[in-house]
Image (tube, rainbow, N blue to C red):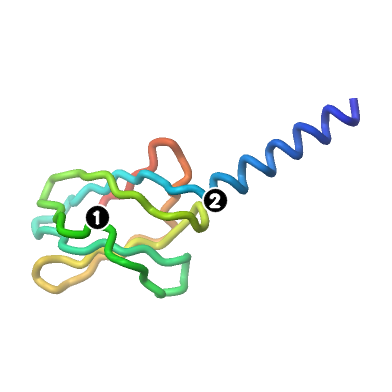
Amino acid sequence: MRKTILVALGLAVCSAASAQGADHAVNVTNTGKIPVIALTTSDPGKNDWGADLLGTRTIGPGKTITVQVKGGACQVDVQAVLDDGGTVEKTGVEICAADASVSL
């Protein structure tokens, strides 16, 4: 019985670790009226924004696209740069779930 519990605990720890190290598909919806021209992430509370996840793409008003967030933690802050120069931020976005999404 004790070996079974230890094996199950070990599998749970390995699953959590691999979820944190994997790439995560995240559906991003623009709920505003201005196109999103850049999208970046940061570890929660760090304001250390990474590379633009959109590349040459944009997210038009009312549109949803899927982006790949590389490795890192299961929670990130997300920053969208709008076509008019404004920004929108969402904090503590969960990205490890199979149906991860964020609306901006």
**Which badge, 2 or 1, comes first in the chain's sequence?**
2
Q: Which residue is depicted at the point 17% across and 72% down?
A: 86
Question: For the residue carrying disc 2, how many other residues have a C-alpha within 10 Å: few (<14), some (14-19), or many (20+)?
Answer: some
Q: Which label lies toward us, 2 or 1?
A: 2
Cα separation between marks 2 and 1: 23 Å
In the rendered image, which residue does mark 1 sit on?
A: 104
Residue pictured at 18% horizontal, 50% vertical: 31
Quadrant assignment, res 78: bottom left
Q: Name the residue under label 2.
A: 20
Could you tell me the amino acid type at mark 1?
Leu
Q: Which amino acid lies under the numbered mark 2 shown in the image of this protein?
A: Gln
Quadrant into which the N terminus falls: top right
Q: Can you say whether 32 is above or below 18 in the image?
A: below
Describe residue 44's horizontal placement relative to residue 25 as left or right. Answer: right
Is the residue 12 above or below the residue 74 in the image? Answer: above
Query: At 50% across and 52% down in the image, what residue appears?
Result: 74
The spot of residue 12 in percent (x, y) is 68, 38
Q: What element carries label 2?
A: helix
